[in-house]
Image: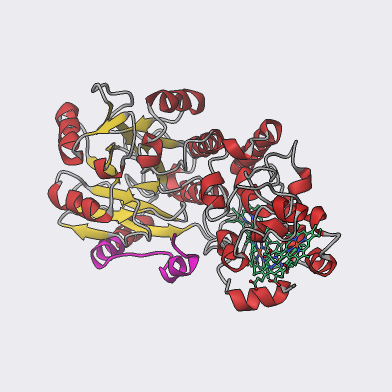
C-alpha cells in the first residue's frame, strides 16, 4: 500500500518538457485567436451556448483509473485526496471551459463480494453522471466475469470496452472500442488488460498489442486520434507505448504512483493512480500533427463536492442502510482478521468489566470507545468498509456482523486488540489469544493513520 505522503510529494500537475512546449505553443495560438474576433465553432460541434469561449477544435480527455472502490476519502485523517465528489466538480469545471470526454482505464472495483459489487455499481453510476464514454476492463473488472459486467452495464448505462478480453470460448462480450466524435475530431478509444494481472478468471486476455492492431484494422482509418486505456504493469505499459506508434496516447494503471506524462516517440504515456486520487487529463489539439499533452491532477480537498455525485453517494448509502450487508458479504473479513484466531468467540467489552475495572474505565475515556460515533456523524455507519475498523471483532464469531444484529459490538473494544477472549472470560487462567502490541497496524495503516507510531499512540491509551 502506498502512503499518501509519497503521493503528495508528487506535484499535483506534472508536465514534461515536450508536452510543456506543445502546451505553451497552444496557449500562444489560443491567445492570438482570442485577440481577434471570437472564434467560430468548427463544423460538427454539438454544444450550444458557451461554446464560443471554448478552444476551437481542442478536446480535453479526462481519464480516471485505479479507483479501487474509493468512492470517497474515508475521513480518518485530514487532507486525503480522491473521491467521486471531487472528480465530479473537476469534470464540471473543465467542461465549463473545454469540450470534455471522460473515460476510465480500469481498476475501479475492489473485490467480488456482494458489498463490493454494489460499491462498484455506485462508482459506475457516478462515472456515467460525469458523462463517461468508455470504461476499460482492468483486472478487478475482469474478476467479476462476463455476466455480472453485462448486467452492470445494462443497469448503469456504462459502456465497457476491451480489445483483448474474451470469454474462454473466444466470445467478445463488450465492445472493443468507442468512436467519439466531438468538436470536429474523431477519437478512437480502445482498452486492454494485461494477461499477467488476471488471476482465476472465467475470462481470457490475448496479447494487448495484437488485439489493438485488430481493432485498428476493423476501424479502417476512420479516426483522427487513437487513445489506448491500458491496465498494464509499468514495464508492459512502457513497452506498449514503444511498440505502438499508431497510438497518440497510452494511459494506464496500476502504477502505484502516477507516471508523469512523457513522450515516447509520438506517443504520450501517463497513468492515473492510487485510488483515483490522481487523474490524467489529456489536451488533444485539433491539428492531428500536434502531439497530445497531459497533466496529472490531484483530486485534492481544494475541489468542492459536486451535488450530483453527493446525491449518488446518498443513494448508495440509503441502499446500504436497507441492505445491511453482513461482514460475510463485505469481502473484508480475511484481510481484517489476519493474525486473529477465531478458535474462541468474541465476548464483548462489557464482559471484561467485573474483573478489569481500571482498564475499562481507561478505555471508556479513549477514542476507541467512541469510534462508532465517528461513523454515525459522517452518515457512514451503514458502510461495511468503515465498519471493519470501527467495530469489535468484525466478521469473527461473536463479533460485529451487521447493524441489525451487532449493536453491542460497535466501537473498538478490548478484543479488537486482545483477540477473541470468551475462553479467558470463563477461565482467566487461559490467556487472551493475541499479541496486542502487534494489532494496531491492522487498523492504523498508512491511509487511515499516517502519523501512527506505537510509542506515542500507546501512551494515549495506556492501561494494565
Ligand atoms: C483500515 C481501518 C479503517 C477504515 C477502513 C476506516 N477507518 Fe476511520 N479511522 C481508523 C483509524 C485507525 C482512525 C484513527 C486515526 C488516527 O487518529 O491516527 C480512524 C479515524 C476516523 C475518524 C476520526 C477522525 C478525526 O479527525 O478524529 C473518522 C471520522 C473516521 N475514521 C471515519 C471513517 C469512515 C467514514 C470510514 C469509511 C469510509 C472509515 N473511517 C474507515 C481506521 C479506519
Ligand atoms: C473473571 C474475571 C476476568 C474476566 C471476566 C476477564 N479477565 Fe482478564 N484477567 C483476569 C485475571 C485474574 C488476570 C490475570 C491472570 C494472570 O495474571 O494469570 C487477567 C489477565 C488478563 C490479561 C493479561 C494476560 C493475558 O491473558 O494476556 C488480559 C490482556 C486480559 N485479562 C484481558 C481481558 C479481556 C479483554 C476480558 C474481556 C473480554 C477479560 N480479560 C475478562 C480476570 C478476568
Ligand atoms: C487499542 C488496543 C487495545 C485495546 C482496545 C485494549 N487493550 Fe489492553 N492492552 C493493549 C496493549 C498493547 C497492552 C500491553 C500489552 C503488553 O505489554 O504486552 C495491553 C495490556 C492490557 C492488560 C495488561 C496485560 C499485562 O500483561 O499486564 C490488560 C489486563 C488489558 N490490556 C485489558 C484490557 C481490557 C479489559 C480492555 C478493554 C476495556 C483493553 N485491554 C483494551 C491494547 C489494547
Ligand atoms: C480495530 C481497529 C483498531 C485497532 C486494532 C486499533 N485502533 Fe486505535 N483507533 C481506531 C479507530 C477507528 C480510531 C478512531 C477513534 C476515534 O478516536 O474516534 C482509533 C484511534 C486511536 C487513537 C486516538 C484516540 C485516542 O483515544 O487518543 C489512539 C491513540 C489509538 N487509536 C491507538 C491505538 C493503539 C496504540 C493500538 C494498538 C495497541 C490501536 N489503536 C489499535 C481503530 C483501531
In the picture, measured across the screen, residue 277 lies left or right of residue 20, that is right
Chain part drawn in magenta: 1-25
Quarter of the picture holding the C terminus: bottom right
The chosen color scheme is: secondary structure
x 31%, y 40%: residue = 198
Residue 355 lies in what quarter of the image? bottom right
x 49%, y 39%: residue = 127
Residue 298 seen in render: yes
x 36%, y 44%: residue = 105
> Is residue 233 positioned above or below 2 on the image?
above
* Count of all numbered marks drawn on residues in the image: 0
Closest to the observer, 359 or 118: 359
x 46%, y 68%: residue = 8
Split into quadrants, the picture shows ligand 3 in the one at bottom right
Q: Residue 179 at x, y = what percent?
A: 29, 32
Quarter of the picture holding the N terminus: bottom left
Q: Main secondary structure of the magenta part?
A: helix
* Magenta-drawn stretch contains 330: no
> Is residue 239 positioned above or below 329 on the image?
below
Residue 290 seen in render: no
Q: Residue 109 at x, y = what percent?
A: 46, 41
Q: Residue 182 at x, y = what percent?
A: 35, 36
Q: Residue 213 at x, y = what percent?
A: 15, 35
* Magenta-drawn stretch contains 2: yes
Amino acid at each position: 500500500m502506498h502512503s499518501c505522503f509519497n503521493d503528495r510529494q508528487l506535484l499535483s500537475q506534472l508536465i514534461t518538457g515536450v508536452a510543456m512546449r506543445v502546451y505553451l505553443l497552444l496557449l500562444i495560438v489560443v491567445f492570438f485567436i482570442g485577440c481577434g474576433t471570437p472564434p467560430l465553432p468548427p463544423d460538427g460541434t454539438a454544444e450550444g451556448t458557451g461554446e464560443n469561449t471554448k478552444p476551437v477544435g481542442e478536446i480535453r480527455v479526462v481519464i480516471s483509473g485505479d479507483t479501487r472502490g474509493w468512492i470517497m476519502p474515508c475521513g480518518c485523517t485530514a487532507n486525503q485526496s480522491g473521491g467521486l465528489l471531487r472528480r465530479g466538480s473537476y469534470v464540471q469545471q473543465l467542461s465549463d471551459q473545454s469540450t470534455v470526454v471522460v473515460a476510465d482505464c480500469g481498476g475501479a472495483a475492489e473485490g467480488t463480494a456482494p458489498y463490493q459489487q454494489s460499491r462498484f455499481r455506485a462508482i459506475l453510476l457516478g462515472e456515467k453522471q460525469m458523462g463517461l464514454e468508455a470504461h476499460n476492463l482492468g483486472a478487478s473488472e475482469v474478476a467479476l466475469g462476463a455476466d455480472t459486467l453485462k448486467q452492470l452495464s445494462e443497469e448503469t448505462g456504462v459502456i465497457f470496452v476491451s480489445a483483448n478480453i474474451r470469454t474462454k470460448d473466444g466470445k467478445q462480450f463488450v465492445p472493443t472500442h468507442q468512436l467519439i466524435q466531438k468538436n470536429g475530431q474523431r477519437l478512437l478509444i480502445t482498452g486492454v488488460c494485461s494477461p499477467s494481472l488476471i488471476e482465476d478468471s472465467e475470462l481470457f486476455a490475448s496479447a494487448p498489442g495484437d488485439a489493438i492492431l485488430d481493432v485498428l484494422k476493423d476501424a479502417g482509418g476512420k479516426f483522427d486520434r487513437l487513445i489506448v486505456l491500458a491496465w498494464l504493469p509499468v514495464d508492459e505499459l512502457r513497452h506498449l507505448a514503444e511498440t505502438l506508434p499508431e497510438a497518440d496516447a497510452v494511459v494506464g494503471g496500476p502504477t502505484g504512483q502516477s507516471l508523469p506524462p512523457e513522450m515516447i516517440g509520438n506517443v504520450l504515456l501517463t497513468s492515473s493512480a492510487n485510488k483515483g486520487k490522481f487523474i490524467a487529463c489529456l489536451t488533444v489539439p485539433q491539428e492531428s500533427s500536434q502531439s497530445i499533452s497531459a497533466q496529472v491532477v490531484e483530486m485534492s480537498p481544494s475541489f468542492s463536492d459536486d451535488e450530483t455525485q453527493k446525491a449518488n453517494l446518498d443513494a448508495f448509502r440509503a441502499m446500504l442502510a436497507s441492505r445491511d450487508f453482513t461482514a460475510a458479504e463485505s469481502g473484508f473479513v480475511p484481510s481484517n482478521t489476519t493474525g486473529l484466531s477465531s478458535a474462541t468467540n468474541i465476548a464483548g467489552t462489557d464482559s471484561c468489566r467485573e474483573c478489569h475495572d481500571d482498564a475499562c474505565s481507561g478505555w471508556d475515556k479513549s477514542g476507541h470507545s467512541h469510534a462508532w460515533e465517528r461513523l454515525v456523524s459522517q452518515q457512514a455507519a451503514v458502510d461495511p468498509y468503515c465498519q471493519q475498523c470501527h467495530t469489535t471483532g468484525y466478521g469473527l464469531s461473536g463479533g460485529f456482523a451487521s447493524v441489525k444484529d451487532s449493536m453491542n459490538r460497535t466501537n473498538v473494544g478490548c478484543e479488537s486488540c486482545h483477540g477473541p477472549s470468551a475462553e479467558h472470560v470463563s477461565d482467566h487462567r487461559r490467556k487472551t489469544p493475541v499479541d496486542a502490541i502487534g494489532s494496531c497496524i491492522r487498523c492504523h495503516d498508512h491511509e487511515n493513520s499516517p502519523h501512527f507510531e506505537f510509542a506515542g499512540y500507546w501512551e494515549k491509551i495506556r492501561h494494565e
